[in-house]
Amino acid sequence: MIKQQFEISAGYKKWTNILLGVGGLAFVLGVVFLGMSKDELAQTRFWSVLLQNSTFFLLVVNASMFFIGVTTLAMGGWQMAFRRVPEAISSVVPVFSVLALLVFVGLIFGNRHDIYHWLDKEHVAHDPILKGKTAFLNPTFFMVWTVVTLSLWSFVGAKMRKLSSQADENMDQETSKKFIWNNTVWAAVFIVFFALTVASTIPWLWLMSIDAHWYSTMYSWYTFASTFVAGMSLVALFVVYLKNQDYLEYVTEEHLHDLGKFMFAFSVFWTYLWYSQFMLIWYANIPEETIYFKPRLQGAYRGIFFLNLIINFVLPFLLLMKRGSKRNYTSMTFVAVLIILGHWVDFYQMVMPGTMHEHYSLGWFEFGMLIFYAGLIMYFVGRGLSKKPLLAVHHPFVKESLIHHT
Amino acid sequence: MALKKFVVGCFEDEKVLFPAVAKVRKAGYKIHDVYTPFPVHGLDKAMGLRDTSLHTAGFLFGLIGTTTAVTFMTWVFTKDWPVNIGGKPNFALPAWIPITFEMTVLCAAVGMVLSFLYICQLAPFVKRHHFHARATDDLFVMVIECGDKTNEKELSSFLSSTGATEVNTQVAEEGWWIGRYDKEQELYKETNIA
């Protein structure tokens, strides 16, 4: 018996509660022992980890919005069979937006110049480089643009999900034409805004400004590639889970194969950007630029730096190369988990060298927050999935998805 | 190449072709090949062909390209003619990545094209037999190989009964110009129908 409506099972609930419990405990202990500690390094650790996790997971769930947007604009019908999964994941964007906003409020209004160097007004006054960047790197612009960005992501996401509900009911030809047009318009609005935010300004503000003197033109695309491949892995994980629980009857290995192709291709795309950023800086060998790679390649982060490259390029490249491994639940699950962890490590090495310098730690609080966010994702995505039927039966593209063949 | 006898059945529509393929295999005849005007999804499965090994070959060719590029550059820049370029180390791996990548792609691509031509037995001056001129236009042409015990008449009428619009017998040179490559065909199973 195939089920149309996702019901949160007891096992799912149990694991959500365990993850939320362990993560929540880590967060509370973190607030007490790190956030409220007298030790400045402990405070820096607390805020860096919050920054890393809140931005990473927000951008990862937002990658589902990007997926919905591009497939809508490209009139891609193949994904209709599991479209409700990225929709459910995108419904977490408002929640993670609020969490990220709280972190940014703490950072900006708490004047944490150990994280964002450019918050130190006295220092900026004597620093010609940072002074030149004040038109962009200032608290007002940071907060205003962040709030605008987060609210627009959440708003357009909600709009797209509401539109999608229309397809649960029967539509005549005129209505479905209008339905497709409405979807296209909102997806276009989102993609343009996505280009202005994730593909450019937002990673500059949130992450690149940690190393305020340094800049890279690849940085935003690099961040986008990192979160998009992790986002596709998250979609694949939920699809495999639902298939194993006897949901999503029309999703076949053909759909899984295409998700696997996304994971494979964007792992390679990420590597391409990683390499482009690294090689240009390495080749030109200008001190202002190489300073970024000094701690990462030669300093305390050397191990993490190469681990990053192995988890995010070598392993997905070799493991997902074969056709069969993209059609197999076990290998897809394994690689998806690997990619998400790998890009979490990637964000770790993007944030920490600029804030913690050589005194970084990868311990209970870092992994605790990872677990906390995993629990949050399970809780909110599960809730999002259970609200609607898993297939928008009357969507005009459904048939194309059912007969999809790679 | 050897001369062989084939019974050729022509079909107007995929919808007729798929059940016909299943029926022919079920009856125990050996399908030599099905020539279609365009790639037909799922036909390979319906015919019971095994997965192609072309991608494995591509991977190996790529590997050859990678190792050639890396070892050659290593030899040139560290052993044969070490030059100090902008103070970079002689073993300058990041600078070699583009060349390594290009060599990998080149070897994989050219190697796969050549392998493909070999598998299809295509080469300059090799004349291939065309079973039906319309196979490149709008006709699906199923070719069945005749063995010693095949009754051609029976086979021809059987093909007509599966929906073939045109059936004839042809003698053609088929086979391999160098070496052998056995196409493995799975035995027909009821679940195999696409």
Image (tube, coloured by chain):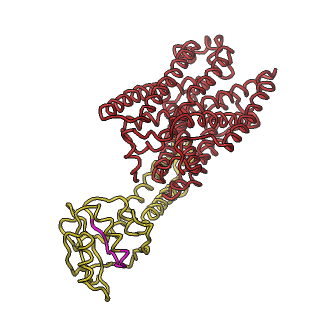
Chain colours: A red, B yellow
Q: Is residue B26 magenta?
A: yes
Extreme-bottom residue of the structure? B148
Residue A122: x percent and y percent? 65, 10
**Image quadrant assignment for residue A39:** top right
Q: Is residue A388 above or below residue A244?
A: above
**Image quadrant assignment for residue B53:** bottom left
Q: Is residue B61 above or below residue A334?
A: below
Name which residue lies at 43% across and 27% down: A190
Q: Is residue B147 magenta?
A: no
Residue A277: x percent and y percent? 51, 37
Q: Nearer the viewer, residue A250 or A44?
A: A250
Q: What is the span of residues highlighted in magenta in the rendered image?
A: B25-35
| Residue A269 makes an appearance in the image | yes
Q: Nearer the viewer, residue A389 or B8?
A: A389
Name which residue lies at 29% across and 32% down: A174
Residue A195: x percent and y percent? 44, 28
Q: Nearer the viewer, residue A140 or A233?
A: A233
Residue A403: x percent and y percent? 39, 51
| Residue B90 makes an appearance in the image | no
- Total tally of numbered discs in the picture: 0
On screen, residue A35 versus residue A90, left or right, reads right
